[in-house]
Structure formats: structure tokens, C-alpha cells
Image: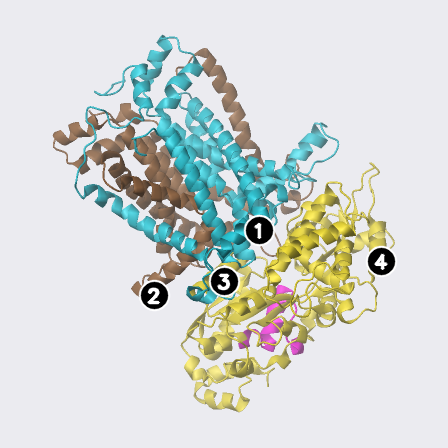
Chain colours: A cyan, B brown, C yellow
Amino acid sequence: MTTHATAPTSATEVITTGRRGRGPTPATGRRRRRTLFPYALIAPAGVMELLIHIIPMLLGVWIAFLSLTQLSIANWVAAPFVGLQNFITSLDPAGPIGSQFYGALLRTIFYTVVVVGIAWSLGIFAAVLLNSKFRGNGVLRTLFLVPYALPGFVTTIAWAFIFNQRDGMLNRLLVDDLGLLTERPFWLLGGNSLIVVIVVTVWQFWPFAFLMLLAALQSIPDEVYEAASLDGASLWKQFTGITLPMIRHANVVLLLMLSLWVFNQFDVPYLLFGPASPEEATLISPLIYQQSFNNWNFGVGGALSVLLLVVLLIASAFYIRLVMPKGQTIDD
Amino acid sequence: MIETRGFRILRAFGLVFLTLIVVVPLYVILTTSIKPLQDVRGLFQWFPSEITFQPYVDIWTTVPLAHYFTNSLIVTVFATTLSVILAILAAYALSRFSFPGARSFSLIVLSTQMFPGILFLLPLYLIFTQIQRTVGVQLNGSYLGLIITYMTFSLPFSIWMLSGFFAAMPRALEEAAMIDGLGRFGALVRVVLPVARPGIIAVAVYCFITSWSEVLFASVLTNADTRTLSIGLRAYASQTDVYWNQMMAASVVVSLPVLIGFLIVQRHLISGLSAGAVK
Amino acid sequence: MKKSRNIRWAALAATAAVSTAALTGCGGTGGTGGSADPAELEGQTITYWASNQGSSISMDEEVLGESIDRFTEATGVEVELEVIPWPDLYNRILAAVSSGEGPDVLNIGNTWAVSLQSSGAFIPWEGDALEAIGGQERFVETSWATGGAEGQAPTSVPLYGLAYSLYYNTAMFEEAGIEEPPATWDEFIETAKQLTKDTDGDGEIDQWGFTLAGQRVSNNAHQAFVRGMQNGGELYTEDGQPDFTNDGVVAGVTQWLDLMDENGVVDPSNAEFTDGSQLPPELIDGRAAMMFDQAAGKTFAAAEFEDFGVAPIPMNSADATGKEGTQSHVAGINVSVFANSDAKDAAIAFVGHLTSDEEQKTLNAAYTSLPVVTSAMDDPAFDTPEMAAKKVTYAEHSQPMPLFPSEGQMETLVGEAIAGLFADIAQGEEVNEEDVRAALEDAQAQMPAS
């Protein structure tokens, strides 16, 4: 294997640069260029984001301060301004919406942590295994991508088939074929329903983690491991000492994005349960959908979304602080 | 990792375990797609009572699948290509220049991932309508509207991910190239991109799949002419009948191009520093 | 004159020169747009969003395409048809309403009518527009009532009529020696109990008297409405305040839940069903003997299943009339004209076409739904046993769902409350009237203040 001039040649060097966030090497340093060039580079993305993402989002935020119902939706520019009323409604723990909001928020946090935790673990495991060379490697890589490539709609229906109480594959296996249980448990009703949502979401998302981590692992030259194994580092040591630090940036971004997506999950519960999620599995996004679209109360839907945005912004800020020491920018 | 005997054993067991996880629901989808409709009802059967490929024939007439296929392909290919290009430019700027506003840009882009899509939907439709009225560019119901929407949706993650990949690359590489007479742009295309290839491939696959399977926005931003596959799939469940077998068959057909495409490009996930090194 | 409209249109198209005179002679009931001169309509294009009524989108495109051809031939108006799948229709309409950018003519579920009416996005059917579609007298009274809130000009016109009926497996009835479908609720429960049994002797019940979709929110709400009515309760007070916990409604909902709980004639696994399409297979496969549905006939036909009978939904007493005699809500699809349409006359003319006697016969026969105009009811296409049973229910034993803007919220909240109770029952809890009342009270507390 040919190496280029600056490729790290020892494990220790890699680990140090890894810890530093793998930014520009000290030799080149950080130059402040007062040119328009970088702005020209981000302009196309910036304009599109502004148009498609930011402005609609700001409109969404504005809606939170309006009384936007079926009476005003056709001329929503003229919808009455109600100040913080929608937020008060959403946050009132004694009120019908507030009482659901807090429960759903806590449940969604739990759900996000569990789903991201498992999806990431499966993803890194698969990525490490498939980063080595062996026959059939490409086929397995493709196979593992299947859950992510399948339309989510069909995936969820297939899982609903599996978890069906009377006819499903799981109960057939547990009760009829293996005889482990005598009664057929309900999976899509009651307390088990949250487990099902978790399983389905993990199944859909872990290949995404796998894909990104596999790409990240490619930036670690084999020599690093060779050096480490000569030093007698165990597999686990190599993993925690070399692999993880070297893919740190990819991990930071992956975990952050994955958490945000899972937190806003809507499709899976909606497709599994229809408009009425079991209470034990009601997540925050379906709650917002219900307020906005079923109850024609876009103002409250907007207020709930803004609250969500605030929660996620704070959490993300903490996270970024935590994983990126002071003085470092996000993109280091 | 170094392939010790322990690693090989771990790998064998690990891959079997992961394969099982993937294959079980897949088995349900595949067998359902070759079962006659009455077989799909009632207690789950491990094997079809008879194998029929009729669902694979019927899917094309129940729903104008070929038409939707073309639509999806057009929208997805354009959205992915544009998104990757825009993301590369922005990520390069963020990883190679330090300029006022860089951090705010990153954070604002990130914040778009924190707002539920369902609350974007109507505002976006309103904006598209407004653009149509003032500029005269048809966005609702057109390919263009959907392309720019999907392109934008995959930008935040792509920018963040790629700027990490770029930042991880030693600058000496491009600097050498620039000294050799390639401009900054030349260095980006000839040196940075080849080295960052695994990341770019991964991000492109992400953009492609995101656009390929998006449902919510497609359901409102398309019409009969521009409807995409993911919307078409739901049409196998009509008001009265649900053609489970056809739906599963269609989803197999729908996923195949993605998987074949991935099978072809996945080798490029392997490359990294060594392959793309100068000279 | 109305009956010969299509023939006349065809003639008009052939003799364009005299068309104006001929129409004027018709006094405007020809359905070509009231004040509008057909010569002015010529060359206009309108967009039509249709709901998915047939077995597939392609089938709808075919059926409606033919109808549109007849319209275009008669008027020279081009119609761009888009059949929209159900999961998307509502969001599409919302987007259209909020942006003002939408079709000229569109189908809506008739229970959305009042909510959408209050948005002001659709034209009211009064004056010239009403005259252009032949006046409200042509329509079945109860179906016309679904068009909007009481005391206001409706903003939607009925298009396809549907009603719940009792569908039963005749082979299973025969095998159990039951000759007549049950007429009263008590008989219904008796019959269902008779049909609930263990057929293969393994100690487990494998044939159930009745099947329902416990998690299907809309259906639960419909049953709360119907059973509530039969027990003398209504979901709203006269002045539009939600009133979910009156004795009649609580008794009605309890009756519905007891089918699974107290009476034990519904397989607890049905508590998991989210979709009405899960029911017909239960009858076809002999797992259940009876079900309530709006249009199962075509599903059975598609499955080549013939051993089914259709009867009216049982009532608390067989001869009940008025509200106590409710067997179904007035189900179906309405059609509206978008107020922002820049081809309103052509759009109104098209609604006139869709609701004309001839098209009502053709379209409803194709979709096995009921005509919404009285004169089309007698067509032989609607004399099949299924249709004949529905006709009586539709015309004499159905009431519109509550005509208040919060009807949609009511359906969601009441339907979800019942779905939750079914889930409890399936998991072994006993649910009594007090639990029902508490759940409905909870649902009512979540209703928006009106």
C-alpha cells in the first residue's frame, strides 16, 4: 500500500489528531481569508435552504401565534393574532393538550435514546465487520442496505403482519411452532406497542448508520491497525483506541441527525396504528399532526412544533458543547 | 481491523446475526409477493400454498407503475445530483475557510432538522403558490418543485457529513496540487473529491433513498402526471380492497433499482486515503 | 326534461348553431350552468379532483373518463381529471384551501362538508348555481342535508350515496339453521351467539358471530352515532355543544363494546384491526358470520364469494322510526366547486352533469353506491339484494352525522376513545358503562370550545 506524505504512520499519531477533532493540521493553521469565495460556495445551498426550509419554518413559527382554524385557513393572512395563547394551551398540564404533551415528550425522549442507541450499535458492528475484505462482502453490504432502501410504507406493513396477534408470524412462532407461550399476546395494543414502534424504527434506521460509519471507517489506513496489533492491542482496544476516535466526526454528526429524525418520527406509528396510537405509544409528532390536521387547530400544532424546536435546539447545543471542546468550530 | 482468528469468528457470528435481523421481515415481503391473495389472509404460512408470479404482472395495470417509476427516477436523479454538488461546495467552504457566519450557517441548516415536516408542508405549498403567481414558474405539481424540495431536504445532513470528511483530509494534499498549477477548484475536483469518495458515495445514497421513498411532501406536491412511486404504492390499498401481494411485489420492484445501483457503487465505498493519494 | 338531458346535449353538440335557443327553451334546468351560455363554456378547461371510489385508480380513471367524454361532447368543456388516493385527498384539499391554488371541482368525504364549509373556500349552492343543477328537490332529502350546516346554503352537493348494512355469510346461517337475518338488536346478539362456536373441537372458538375493526376510528364514531340514536341519545345538543356522555350515547357505545366484552361474539383479536378492508375476508374465510359495512358487495364479488346476504342494521325495536330508527349515518361522497375557480360556470355545469339522472345511474352502478337523486333510484341497476336493502336504509333510516364544524374532531376523539376501550377489553379488562362514560367524558373534554 502506498502512503502519501502526511498519512499518519503510527497509531499514537492518529489518536492524537483524532482527539483534536481532526481539523486542519497545525502546520497549515487557520487563515482568515477575507474573500467572498466561501460565501459564493455556500450561496447555492443557502438560498435553497432559505426558500424551502427556513422560510416555511418561520411561517410555521408565526402560525403558532395565530388562531388558525377552519374558519381562517382560507385567508390565513388575516387569521387573528392570539399572542401566547396557543403556547399556554399547549403547556397547561391540566388541559387536554398539555396533559398529553408532557407524557408524549418524555416517551419520545425515551424512544429516541433507545432507537438511536440500538441503531448505532448495530450500524457500527456491521460497519466494522464489513470493512474487512472477504468474499461476498459486496452482497452483504447491499443486503444490509435493504431495510433502508425499502419503502417505509411497505416495511411497516410487513412488520404489522409479523406482529398481528392472531395470524402474525411472531405469535405463530412463539405459540404454535415453539410452544413457548400458551396465550397469544397482543403486540399492537397496550404496553407492547411501544416495543413494536422501537423495533420497526430500528430496523429501518440502522442500515443508515451502517452506511455512514462504513464510509467513515474507510478513512482509517490499515497501517494504523497493523501498528496497533504489533503493539499487542486487543480487538476491543483497537476499536476504542483507534476506530472510534478516528471516526469521531462522522459519529458526532450521525448521532445528532439520527436523534433529530427519530425524535420527529411520524410515519411508523401512523402506519402501524392508524390515526389512534395506543396511549402507551403516542409520540410527539403524531400528536402535532392530530392537533393540526384532525382538529383543524394549526395554531396549537404550530405552538407544539415551536416548543419541540426549542427543546431540540437546547439539547443540540448541549450536545455540541459536550462533544466539541471550546474554541473548536463545528466543522473541525 | 486486523483479521485475527478471533475477529474472523466474531465476524462470522456477527454477520449471521445481522443477516437474520434483515432477512426475517424481508422473507415476509418476498413470500407475500408470490402468494395468491387469499393466502395472505389467515394464519401466517411459512410457505406459499402455491407460488404465483401474477402479482408481478398485475402491479403494472392496477396502478400506472411504469409512469410513476419514470417520475421517481427523474425527480430522484436530479435531486440527488444537485444536492451532492451543492453539499460539496458548501462543505468545502466550511471545512477549508474560516469566515464570519460559517458557524451560524451550520447551525441554521441544522435547525431545519428539528421542525416536524408536517408543519412545513402547508407553508411550503403557500410559498410555491406565491412564486407561481409572481414569477410564473410552475412548482406545485411539477418535477421542478419536487426536485428542489428533495434536494434541499437532503442538504443539511450532506453538508454536515461531508464537511467532516473534508476536514479530516490533510490540507497538504490540495496545497501540493495547487502548487502544481491546479487552481483551488482544480484541486477540489482532482484531489479532494477522489479522496473523499466513500463519503460522497454514502451521502449520495442517502440523498437518493430519501428522495426515492419520501411520501408526505410528494402526496401534496405532485399531481396525476408527476406522482411518484412511493405515492403509487399506497394506491394498492384502495377504499375497499387491499392487494397485499401486489403491494409487496411492487415494493420489491421499486427497491430493486436502488439496490442494483448500490451493488454497483458500493465498491467505491472502499477507497479512501490510499487510493486517492497524490500520484 | 331532466331525463332527456344527455340526449339533448348530444343533439346540441351536433347542431351547435341552434344550441343556445334550445337551451333557453329548457329553462336552465339542463344543467349547463344556469346563467351561462353554453357557447361561452365552449373551449374552457376545468380541473377535477376525484376520490378513489373504484377498486383501483385506473378503474376510476376509466369510469370517470367516459363520463367526462360525454360532458365534453355536450359542452365543449375540457376536464382534466385527477383521481387522488384517499390518504392524500384531505391534505391536498387543505393545501388548496389555504393557498387558494386548487382544482375547479373536487370530491370530499361528506362528513368533512361542514368543516370545509366554514372555511369559505367553496361556492354556496343557491340561486343560479342551484338552479343549474336542477334544484334541491331532485336530491334525496337526507343526502342533500349532508352538504353543509343547517340554516346555511350548502357548499357541497351529494354525489355518491352509501349506507351501512348487515352483511352475513348465508352458508354459515344455513348450517346453524338460521333462516332470517336478525331484525332487532336482541335477536342480533342471539344469532351472533348461536354462530360463535368451536367448530373443530379443540376447545377454542374458531368461528365468531360478528366481526368489527376495533381500532378503526371513523367506524367507531359512526357506530357511536347510530347506536346512540337508537338509544335516544345524540352526540351534540341542538345548539351544537358536544354531549358525548348522555345516557343514550353511553348505552349505545356500551352495546357496541359489549359485542366483544359481555356478549363475547367478537374475536378479541379484532380489537387490533385498523381497517375496514380487514373485515370481508373474515366472512369469506368463515371466521365470522356477520359484519357491518357500507359497500362490501364489490369486495365479495372481486373475491368471487357469493354466499352472502344483506340486511338492514338491526335496531333496538324492529319497527322503530325517526331518530330511534337510525341504521346508518348518511354516508357518501359530495362534490364542491372551488370559490377561486376562474371557470365557475363550467365547473357548475360539470357538477350538474355528474348529478344528472343518467350519470347518477351510470356512476353509482359502476361504484355500487346509491344515486343521490330520487329519480335515479328506480333504475334496475339498484335492485340487487344489496342495493335494495341499502336503498331503504339510505332513504328512510339514515341521518346525517352531526352538522357542526367540529364534527371531524368529534369523530377522532369518540372513535379513539372506543378504540382504547376495545384494546382494554381485548387484553382482558372488563369494561362497564361507567368506564364508557369516563372515556367519553375524557374525549369531550378535549373538544375545542365552540
Q: Quadrant of residue A194?
A: top right
Identified at 61% across, 58% down, the residue is: C447
Dot 3: element: helix
Gap between marks 3 and 1 measured at Cα:
26 Å
State yes or no: discs 1 and 4 in contact (Cβ < 8 Å).
no
Q: Quadrant of residue B194?
A: top left
Gap between marks 1 and 2 measured at Cα:
38 Å
Gap between marks 4 and 3 measured at Cα:
43 Å
Which quadrant is the N terminus of chain A positioned in? top left
Q: Is residue A22 left or right of residue C265?
A: left
Is C230 or A205 nearer to us in this picture? Answer: C230
Extent of the magenta region: C352-376
Residue A167, given in percent of the width and then of the height, sits at: 68, 40
Q: Which residue is mark 2?
A: B133
Mark number displayed over residue A97: 1
Give above or below for C110 relative to C357. above
Residue B268, given in percent of the width and then of the height, sits at: 34, 30
Identified at 70% across, 36% down, the residue is: A185
State yes or no: discs 2 and 3 in contact (Cβ < 8 Å).
no
Dot 2: element: helix
Q: Which residue is mark 4?
A: C186
Gap between marks 2 and 3 measured at Cα:
19 Å
Instruction: Say which label, 4 or 3, has the lower sequence index.
Output: 3
Kind of residue indicated by mark 1: Ile
Same chain letter for marks 4 and 3 = yes
Q: Which residue is mark 3?
A: C93
